[in-house]
Amino acid sequence: MFILRDLIKPLQSVFPDTDNGRERFVWFAYTMVAILVPVTSARSSNLLRALQSLFGLSISQRRFYTFMASPKMPWQRIWHYLWDRIPQPFTENRLLLALDDSINPKTGKKIFACQHFFDHAAKDNQARYPWSQNIVTVGLLKSIRGRWCCLPLSFRFYFLKKTLAQATVCMGSKEIAFRSKFDQAVEMITELAQAFTQHPILVVTDSWFGNNGLLKPLSGALGDRVHLLARLRCNAALYAQPDPRQDNNGPGRPRKYGTRLGQVSEWVEHARQHARLCKVTLYGKPRELMAYDRIVMLKSLRRQVRVVWVFRNTQWIALVTTDLALSVEQIIEYYGARWKIEAGFKEIKQEIGSAKSQTRDPYAVTNHLHFCMAATTLTWIFADRMDHTPARRYATNTRTEYAFADVRRSIADTIAKQGFDIGCPKATKPERKSLLSTFMRLVA
């Protein structure tokens, strides 16, 4: 339990040293723990019941809801503190950042940031344009105790341009202006680059973000320090490198691209015939697959890239990266780890309970999502600092690695054994042999 205390207690320094600031920190600390333990979903009403019944805090409903919708929460400083507490955030001397966006469906009206977004993953019995929030998220890909994890680091709400043109949307007294997903991603990655200095950054993303709309502004802000790893579209055109022996003394500029080699899909058979065997750790298991790589020029990125065709059984995909120093095995494993940001969306929305919140106020919506993402990051930091690897509760022959829920149960088990003490004053309930300890033993 000292892990949580050591992580949360120093956060008091980011709150103002006033009576209101100290009180706000106490509520923040116990609200964070109420989200961390698998007692209930992170709806504000459920959190209030947990604070009153389990932790014994004396707080009225009105004051707690005012706290959850407070515009004075120092989230920027809280996130900078969490970034500094991640043990060994670099993988082979690189900062691996996963970038993606997700939709968070809602049912209530007049909820901040809710619009009708297209859901490309909707099933036949689901709406194609659900009423939802679109959240652009950047997470850290890191291997923790033998499995890849995604630690949320930053997020932005995306607003459709036509929505902002039809009505004015405000965050408090500030009117929200349209910003593309690329602009929001560049802003978040640039801020992270300033916190994690002197290390190259590899942004791992899907094919939608894997183009010059993201890489060009990133390169302008960070130079050669940033690289991209993404899935390549099957109809992307490949070009050979320009011949340096050609006569450049004639009129016009030198050629940037050589001969057109064809589309990615046209190279599949050639790549399959010349592929070599690769042994990689993919999705938690050692696997053998065939891969073929080639350095080409790509007009969508306007630079030299390495393209890797990966074959397994009858399926194939093409990956592209601007970091030519990466090996084929690293490219495959890092892109396979990208799926953890998709699993992270499920953890935040379903296991933590962000999707069940029906708050409407702009600050309440933003604070609630900050709480959920910060709790997810704290959970993985807790797992990284544990003395032993958590045991998987429902292990099978194919799945033996621990899950996100197993870490949360370890937190509850620690609370049941040691009680929760972060060194700040709270209510009158005893730390041990209380309702809290009994309940934690049930959920652990």
Image (cartoon, grey):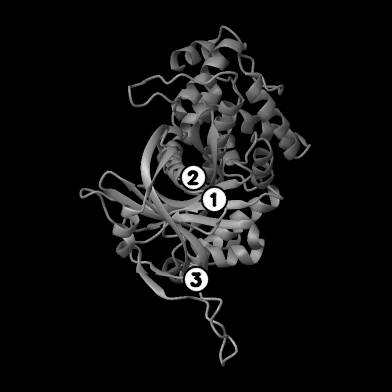
Residue drawn at the location 71% of the way across and 24% of the way down: 424
Instruction: Using the numbered discs, state the Cα–Cα distance from disc 3 to disc 2 in whole angstroms.
Output: 26 Å
In the picture as drawn, the residue positioned furthest to the front comes out as: 245
Residue drawn at the location 54% of the way across and 50% of the way down: 326
Q: Which residue is mark 3?
A: 241
Residue sitting nearer the eye, 323 or 197: 323
Residue sitting nearer the eye, 194 or 416: 194
Residue drawn at the location 53% of the way across and 57% of the way down: 228
In x, y percent, where is residue 314? 25, 47
**Mark 2 residue type:** Tyr
**Mark 1 residue type:** Leu
Q: Which residue is mark 2?
A: 334
Question: Going from the N terminus, do you reach mark 2 or mark 1 first?
Answer: 1
Query: Alpha-carbon neighbours of circle 1 within 10 Å: few (<14), some, or many (≥20)?
Result: few
Q: Which quadrant holds the N terminus?
A: top right
Residue sitting nearer the eye, 76 or 234: 234
Residue sitting nearer the eye, 206 or 408: 206
Q: Which mark is residue 338?
A: none
In x, y percent, where is residue 343? 42, 39
Could you tell me if the residues under marks 2 and 1 are in contact, i.e. CB atoms within 8 Å?
Answer: yes
Question: Which mark lies nearer to you, 1 or 3?
Answer: 3
Question: Which mark lies nearer to you, 2 or 1?
Answer: 1
Q: Which residue is mark 1?
A: 326
**Residue 136 seen in this snapshot:** no
